[in-house]
Amino acid sequence: MLLFILTFIVSKYLFHKGKKSFGFAADATTFLLFFSVSNAFSIIFSKSVFLLLIVASLLIATIFTYLDWRKQKEIEVIPLLRKIWRLLFLLLSVAYAFIWLIGVIQYVLYYIS
């Protein structure tokens, strides 16, 4: 999340536009969230989920592409990819927050007992 904030600040300085800066920061952070969520999950639960994240992302992309095709009959690639990437940002951010919370709870319970 620190990377998101830093990227947002730098891009806001470069672009001078809030919405474009937020989107750029989300796009840059999404790539790293794939690795962060996978790594945090494997540390806490000793199971790798990287391949599962990739498969789930491809499934989401397939569903979004199908829905976009059904609605418009002509697929605009860049807006479609942007929608998919932003949805993945939201999902991975929520997953990271939950994994982080579980890790904190496990850490506290370990030192209490």
Image (cartoon, grey):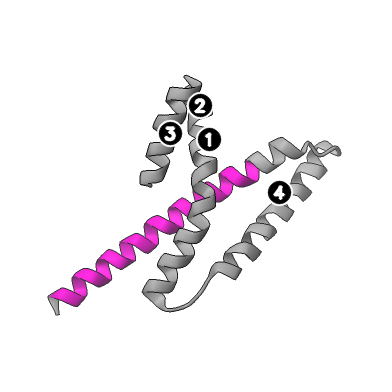
In magenta, the rendered stretch is 83-111
Name the secondary structure under disc 4: helix
Location of residue 54 in the rendering, given as x and y in whole percent from the top left corner: 62, 63
Q: Nearer the viewer, mark 4 or mark 2?
A: 2
Mark drawn on residue 19: 2
Q: Quadrant of the C terminus?
A: bottom left
Q: Earlier in the sequence, mark 4 or mark 2?
A: 2
Q: Amino acid at mark 4?
A: Phe
Q: Earlier in the sequence, mark 2 or mark 1?
A: 2
Whether residues under marks 3 and 1 lie with C-beta atoms below 8 angstroms apart, the answer is yes
Q: CA distance from mark 3 to mark 1?
A: 7 Å
Whether residues under marks 1 and 4 lie with C-beta atoms below 8 angstroms apart, the answer is no
Location of residue 37 in the rendering, given as x and y in whole percent from the top left corner: 46, 61
Q: What residue is drawn where x is 35% and y is 45%?
A: 2
Residue placed under numbered mark 3 in the picture? 8
Q: Earlier in the sequence, mark 3 or mark 2?
A: 3
Q: CA distance from mark 1 to mark 4?
A: 21 Å
Q: Nearer the viewer, mark 4 or mark 3?
A: 3
Q: Amino acid at mark 2?
A: Lys
Residue placed under numbered mark 4 in the picture? 64
Whether residues under marks 2 and 1 lie with C-beta atoms below 8 angstroms apart, the answer is no
